[in-house]
Amino acid sequence: MEQVDHFFTVEGVSEGLYKEKGSKFIAYAYPVKNEEEVKETLLELKKQYYDARHHCYAYMLGAERKDYRANDDGEPNHSAGDPILGQINSKNLTNVLVVVVRYFGGTKLGVSGLINAYKVSAEEALSTAKVIKIDVTKSIHLEYTYEDTNDVMKLVSDFNIDITDQKFEAACAMKGEVNINLVHQLQEKVQLLQDLSKNVKLTID
């Protein structure tokens, strides 16, 4: 199976609105990284729109787009969550949550009407969002002596390592993120340094 080395998500919160026969569908798209963020966002939205009849949603998580869920929140089965998820899929997005808040207007729309309303409102929220490309990275840990700092800094530069934590002492250490496609090359380069009697140790998390 081919390794996924990047994915697309939304940069920030965006909104959409659809009205039909008195009903109002307010859609929001959010960038999320895990189910905890999904739960927190839903909780906040339900507080904000406490008087709405439905808070239907769908989300997709992970670079491989395997972790997803659709929720109809009391609407007829597959009339709300699935159309929302369909819009996330059609734009090939992940790490995104789309919630559509519905205020009932007194006239029933029927299942086909609901499917269309949730689809259009979700599409509107996503179409106004700024889509960004994210490279998939691996967490690394480098240990080295102070004398080998220059060699390690060259690794940081050559492999575009995003440093997340470091300490400079007699025994130095650094944590960072590196593009998943460069991990093997980085391991080979560290091995070369070790062959040159450099005290550099690499751990891939």
Image (tube, helix red, strand yellow):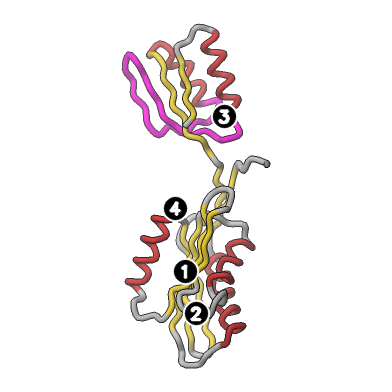
From the top left corner, tell me how far across and down residue 102 is, in percent: 45, 79
In the image, taking residue 193 as reference, residue 165 lies left or right, namely left
Kind of residue sitting beneath label 3: Val
Residue 90: image quadrant is bottom right
Determine the secondary structure under disc 3: helix
* Residue that mark 4 sits on: 34
In front: mark 3 or mark 4? Answer: 4
2 and 3 marks in contact (CB < 8 Å): no
Magenta residues (range): 157-182
Q: Residue furthest front?
A: 77
Earlier-in-chain disc, 3 versus 4: 4
Q: For the point 44% across and 32% down, which residue is it?
A: 176
* Residue that mark 2 sits on: 75
Quadrant for the N terminus in the image: top right
Q: For the point 56% across and 81% down, which residue is it?
A: 114
In the image, taking residue 165 as reference, residue 60 lies left or right, namely right
Determine the secondary structure under disc 4: loop
Earlier-in-chain disc, 1 versus 3: 1
In front: mark 4 or mark 2? Answer: 2
Q: CA distance from mark 4 to mark 1?
A: 15 Å
In front: mark 4 or mark 1? Answer: 4
* Residue that mark 1 sits on: 99
Height in image: 91 above or below 171? below
Earlier-in-chain disc, 1 versus 2: 2
Q: Is residue 4 visible?
A: yes
Q: For the point 57% across and 13% down, which residue is it?
A: 192
4 and 2 marks in contact (CB < 8 Å): no
3 and 4 marks in contact (CB < 8 Å): no
From the top left corner, tell me how far across and down residue 107 is, in percent: 50, 92
* Residue that mark 3 sits on: 183
Residue 173's disc number:
none
> In the image, is residue 59 part of the stretch drawn in magenta?
no
